[in-house]
Structures are given as C-alpha cells and as structure tokens.
C-alpha cells in the first residue's frame, strides 16, 4: 500500500470517528448535523484517495465524491429546514426534547 494512501485513510478514519462521536454524544441538533457532514466528508476523502492511489486509478471515486457532495448539500438543506420547524414548535435545539410526534 502506498504511504500517501495510508495517511489519507488514517485522516479519514479520524474524521469519521470524530463525526461519529459528535453525532452520538451531543445534544445540540446543529452539532449533530455538522457531525453527519463531517462523516460524509471522511467518506469523500476515502473515495478520492482510492481514486488517486488505488489499485486501478480512475475518476470513478471522484465522480462518486461529487454525487455525495450533492446529496450532502440536499441533506443539509432539508435538515436545517426540519430543525427550524422543530425550533418554532419547541423553542429549543436539544435533541432529547424532540422525541414527541404529533397525532
């Protein structure tokens, strides 16, 4: 394995772990959304690293990374819209208080 590939994979693993910790342990909904974005960026880093330094270098990983960025942008827009709607109803961004559904 290439030394550059292993360093990119290590950085992506660290970013993913930090994002996973933030998504599972924080109570602020904005921090949870940012943590999910951090995990998606770690996946993008893996895709681009394997695209450049993998066994068969091609543009496929970079194209998938672009699609992932588009999905992440849509996810952020929908997530912020849902968060604003919940904030208007509950007046808080604490995810532990957002566990009730309307009937």
Image: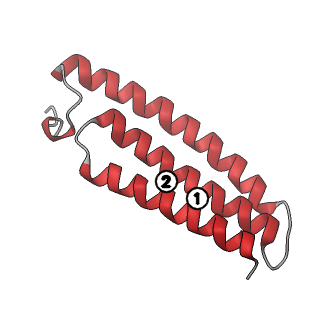
The N terminus lies in quadrant: bottom right
Q: Do callouts 1 and 2 mark residues in contact (Cβ within 8 Å)?
A: yes
Q: Nearer the viewer, residue 31 or 11?
A: 11
The image's mark for residue 100 is none
Q: Residues within 10 Å of mark 1 (few under 14, many from 20)?
A: some
Q: Kindly identify which residue carries mark 2.
A: 39
Relative side of 95 to 82, left or right: left
Left or right side of 2 for 81: left
In depth, the one of 85 and 44 nearer the eye is 44
Based on the displayed image, in which of its 4 quarters is residue 97 positioned? top left
Name the spot of residue 91 as percent of width and height, x first.
Answer: 18, 19
Q: Quadrant of residue 89?
A: top left
Residues packed near mark 2 inside 10 Å, few (<14), some (14 to 19) or many (20 plus): many
Q: Quadrant of the C terminus?
A: top left
Asked which secondary structure carries label 1, the reply is helix
User: Where 75 falls versus 15 (above or below)?
Assistant: above
Spot occupied by residue 93 in the image (x, y as percentages of width and height):
24, 29
> What residue is shown at x 35% (from left), y 29% (from top)?
82
Image: 33 above or below 47: above
Q: Which residue is mark 1?
A: 43
- Foreground residue among 101 and 58: 58
Looking at the image, residue 101 lies above or below residue 64: above
């Amino acid at each position: 394995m290439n030394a550059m590939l292993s360093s990119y994979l290590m950085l992506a693993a660290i970013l993913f772990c930090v994002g996973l910790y933030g998504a599972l342990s924080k109570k602020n909904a904005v921090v949870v959304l940012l943590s999910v974005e951090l995990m998606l960026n770690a996946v993008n880093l893996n895709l681009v690293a394997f695209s450049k330094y993998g066994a068969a270098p091609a543009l496929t990983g970079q194209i998938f990374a672009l699609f992932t960025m588009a999905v992440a942008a849509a996810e952020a827009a929908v997530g912020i819209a849902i968060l604003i709607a919940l904030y208007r109803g509950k007046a808080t961004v604490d995810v532990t208080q957002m566990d009730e559904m309307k009937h």
